[in-house]
Image (cartoon, rainbow, N blue to C red):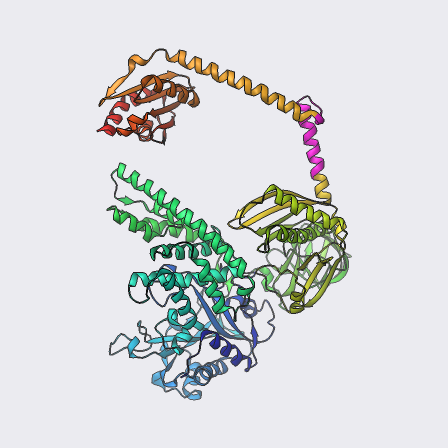
Amino acid sequence: MQSYGVNQLRKMFLEFFESKGHLAMKSFSLVPHNDNSLLLINSGMAPLKPYFTGQEIPPRKRVTTCQKCIRTGDIENVGKTARHGTFFEMLGNFSFGDYFKNEAIEWSWEFLTEVVGLDPDRLYPSVYVEDDEAFEIWNKKIGISPERIFKFGKEDNFWEHGSGPCGPCSEIYYDRGEKYGCGKPDCKVGCDCDRYMEIWNNVFTQFENDGEGHYSELEQKNIDTGMGLERLASVVQDVDSIFDVDTLKELRTHVCRLANVEYAKDYQMDVSIRVITDHVRSVTFMISDGIMPSNEGRGYVLRRLLRRACRHGRLLNIEGNFMETLAETVIEGSKDGYPELEEKRDFILKVIVKEEEQFNKTIDQGLGILSEMIADMNTVQKKTLPGEDAFKLYDTYGFPIDLTKEILEEKGMDVDEEGFRAAMEVQRKTARAARGVTNYMGADVTIYESIDPSVTSTFVGYEHLNYESEILVLTSETKIVDALSEGERGTVFVESTPFYATSGGQTADTGIISTSEGVFKVEDTIKLLGGKIGHVGQVVSGMLRAGQKAELSVNAGKRALSARNHSATHLLQKALRMVLGTHVEQAGSSVNEERLRFDFTHFSAMSREELKKVEDIVNENIAASLPVEIQNMPIEEAKKTGAQALFGEKYGDIVRVVNMGGFSIEFCGGTHVKNTSEIMAFKIISESGVAAGVRRIEALTSKGLLDYYSSLEEKLNEAARAMKAAPDNLVEKISHLQSENKALHAEAESLKSRLAQDAMGDVMNQVQEVAGLKLLAIEVDSVDMSGLRELGDQLKDKLGEGVVVLASDNEGKVNLMATATEDAIKQGAHAGNLIKAIAGLVGGGGGGRPNMAQAGGKNPTGIKEALVKTAEVLKGQLS
């Protein structure tokens, strides 16, 4: 058998199924489209769900893909074994109501034996125990003897998750030979050892489960098959694991070179090598699809993987930042199959460098926090770190539990792992609840998904703001209806609509749909699967019926203002790339009639000068009255124009290109001005950070900007009236008042200090001696915290060397303050720990540094007891 590389096998598979009439589609993004049931694409079938469920009509009834996937369910096992990984490529061939079991089985056998050249005698199929049809095909058509066909039950060979489409499956196992086996005499397909590896899975989607265990035959039977590319490569290349196949081995070798270690010499080192090898692949691919590090959702998955890899780099003693150079190796090894890696190379590397630098800071912070936790445990003589604290370290500082355990073990301590797992489960449940209930095909069906998939809408709003069309479907909030009456809420679907549905950051059009019998107020317009456009709102008079002709009228004023703000975001993005650099990519936007918001990738706050430059560039191009030309063209031709694509977006063969006088050229489906002069003017209102490596600009144009200036003018006049000044000399008046206030404040502080000293009287006769050290612990009346600190400094000077503790009942609230001199600290005194020990007696808490600490409390009756206890605590510190 010839040995093929990963990139060759991918090409061979896709070309084979193209020869069988399949459309070879590019891998979809790792970010699910219109599917809240998934954080990340985790199978070849996942992005094709709408074709399986009938919500969308597929481009062809036969499709083949090599889909990039990420699964993190068993992330803790990655590295510990040679078979677990988070990133993998899934080869798949799919039939949407076309061919079924015969062809699926025949072609899987043909590809494995004739194209790849695997030995047929080493291949063993399995079928669902009740699937006689699949058994017959393997036995009679393919010619496999019955004893080599394994029958398994529902758990192994039936695919279903709750209600929805489901069906039996047939897997193909490859015998890798005795060297991979367990040596038991009864070792066979289904054994837990590594000898028999499942390499292909044909899922025959032929039933509908009602959720209560009742199955009915599906009218449209589908084929969903999958084969892990790396797993196939490990068989073809006859290597131990996925980490030994050509592309991963090259990456693994690079890790070893950086760490100056050898693979397969030490188990713990191998764990770290495998973790880094796997995780850097996942991270590189995720960033190429526009996923950015964050503390929630898929951004959290990315951050967790990257930090886990960094942490294992530390365990291997790799010096400095190393993830960037490994990501380069990932890009080189996979760019043939995934050109987006090369296109986004600079951006991928920048994000990785920034996140790795940030982690190196937070892990040091985490070490500091853990040290404090250990000190607190020592104080109360505890040996087990609470699970909540371990989870806080993990969740906030990216501190893996094994690192926490390791450090604690060195101190003769351990961690409450059960408590840690409980805290982790709470977070998982919260995340699951946020994603909603799912089944094999995705989220629960809504009323919109019950609409006939042949119903579709044409958008005519680029040319028209008013249009006549037929009402195709009406829905209430829960069902499809024939009519909607006055006061009822629902959704209207028509053949052709001028209403723009929310997409690309531009908010939806609103307006009116009227018929001869009624008027419907459109409050929102939504884009749904299968090219449907829904008009959501309420009947304000009369009645609407399906089949009627309707006049659709868009709110023209709102549309015009939204278009101005949308066009301004195009000018803004180009200006940002000019001022900050070409790493700037759009990371999200929101545009309505009032303002625009633009999120972009950049790694530090913008300076005032940079913001001014960007603003000036945008206003120059508004003033230049640039014509806005819009063309539909083939995607390859569009790329040659230098048009900017939206990061992570999947485009069809024909794209809409918006060209603003050659200054800004972008792919965009939104509505725009005809000339930049319509925008009038542009003003940035704020610039802020929204996530690691993502900044946000909020800005105004045209009417929104005029309204903003009117509001500012009104506030200015109001402030001037309050200051009894004219707007022109308001600054001068404020400056004068500030000087006056400063002088009065200084005078008041001086008076407070004198009053505090008078209240205290001469207290030096209350100095005690504790273990040879002077201690002054006294109560003073009605002094705030800043007054106590000032008194403390004065008394410390009088004392010479020692410790001063002051307590005051200030309007029913207790203020406590302790200060220690350098000499006292050398002898063991610690103001922070002293305050911590006595604060509980006044019903409060606090702490601080060895030389100064403070606390608050709610129980003034405990002051005397706290001051008495001071000597006892200090004595303990000095002994």
The answer to whether residue 591 is above or below residue 232 is above
What x and y, as percent, mark residue 59? 61, 73
In front: 149, or 708?
A: 708
Name the one closer to the observer, 99 or 868: 868
| Whole-percent x, y for residue 291 in the image | 52, 57
Q: Where is residue 60 in the image (x, y as percent from the top left)?
A: 60, 75
In the rendered view, would you say 473 is above or below 387? below
Q: Main secondary structure of the magenta part?
A: helix
User: In what quadrant of the picture does the C terminus appear?
Assistant: top left
Quadrant housing the N terminus: bottom left
Q: Does the magenta stretch include residue 712?
A: yes
Q: In this view, does 491 lie to the left or right of 446?
A: right
Q: Can residue 453 be seen in this view?
A: yes
Q: Quadrant of residue 543?
A: bottom right
Identify the residue at image location x=49%, y=74%.
Answer: 92
751 vs 223, nearest the viewer: 751
Q: Can residue 507 be seen here? A: no
* Residue 259 on the magenta segment: no
Residue 550 drawn above or below residue 738: below
Q: Which stretch did the figure color magenta?
A: 708-728
Q: Position of residue 117 (x, y in %)?
A: 42, 84
Give the number of callouts.
0
